[in-house]
Amino acid sequence: MVLQGILGAVCISIFSVFALVSMPETKIFFQRTEITEAVTEESTYIYEEQNTVTEVTTEEISSVPKSSGKIVVIDPGHQRVGNSEQEPIGPGATETKNKVTYGTEGVKSGIAEYELNLSVSLKLKDKLENMGYTVILTRENNDVDISNMERAEIANNVNADAFVRIHADDSENSEVKGAMTICQTPSNPYNGGLHKESYALSEAVLNNIVSATGAEKRNVWQTDTMSGINWAKVPCTIVEMGFMSNHEEDMLLATEDYQYKMAEGIAKGIDEYLRNKE
């Protein structure tokens, strides 16, 4: 890509990331594109790309997010059809769980959790990319078959700076509502050494969700029962956005406005956590 200008040029690197999953092996491909940004006395520039001449304004150039060099992997929880085949709950474990489940659905909205999770994840991806992060989704549609272990391996294979799993909750008690996050305990036999970082990520995300949405704050639940956390070799949190078994919260989660607020809160929490690590 060549950008012609009068005074000089500054180079910006943008990474497009493609996650291709083939069972049982996961491969991550990166494509690098170089954009040369010219600084000229005029407000409009011309660049050539694959023999096509395109007009670009200074405003468009300045709006290109600068890569932070950090990678966030987002896992939209569940999928359209669950897989009841078993896999170990962690490396070397004898205990097993279903590879992946269908999830829950809205008691009033009727929306499937796997649909809600993907909808919020796509919004979250856009917000994080606008902040300059490289973002990988473990899935971009509902018709997949990716186990919880395989989802964690996607994050492990790119050495993600944060692995964020998007879910919604349910309860037999329809009065229960609110958001919470989940991480491992310090004594987790698979990755307890990541507890401090995972807890910090979980806490930052939860606090910012509450600020952005006004949701009731529950807690950071520390447990070693989650396969997708146990297989992670990077800081990880599960976000439980709210209870689809609560009529009021279910209908809120079904709205675009609330989903954007949720995505904004999660993105700010991730950003806060990663900035505090610097």
Image: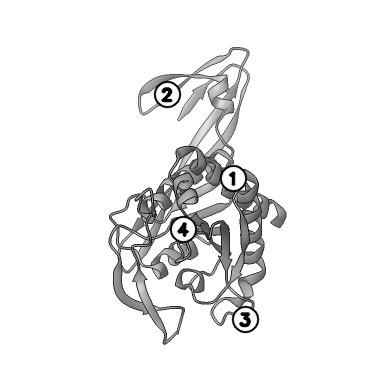
Label 3: few (<14), some (14–19) or many (≥20) C-alpha neighbours in 10 Å: few
Disc 1 from disc 3: Cα separation: 33 Å
Residue at the spot of label 4: 167
Report whether residue 125 is seen: no
In percent of width and height, residue 225 lies at 49, 76
Q: Is residue 161 above or below residue 225?
A: above
Q: Nearer the viewer, mark 4 or mark 3?
A: 4
Residue at the spot of label 3: 187
Q: Which mark is residue 83?
A: none
SS for dot 2 = strand
Q: Quadrant of the C terminus?
A: bottom right
In percent of width and height, residue 20 lies at 35, 55
Residue furthest to the bottom in view is 94
Residue at the spot of label 2: 48
In percent of width and height, residue 99 lies at 35, 71
Whichever of callouts 1 and 2 sits on the residue coming sooner in the sequence is 2
* Callout 1–callout 3 Cβ contact below 8 Å: no
Quarter occupied by residue 264: top right
* Callout 4–callout 3 Cβ contact below 8 Å: no
Amino acid beneath label 3: Ser
Whichever of callouts 1 and 3 sits on the residue coming sooner in the sequence is 3
Q: Nearer the viewer, mark 1 or mark 4?
A: 1
Q: Nearer the viewer, residue 145 or 224?
A: 224
Q: From the viewer's perspective, is 102 left or right of 177? A: left
Residue at the spot of label 1: 213
Q: Is residue 274 above or below residue 171?
A: above
Q: Is residue 270 above or below residue 171?
A: above
Label 1: few (<14), some (14–19) or many (≥20) C-alpha neighbours in 10 Å: some
Q: Nearer the viewer, mark 2 or mark 3?
A: 3
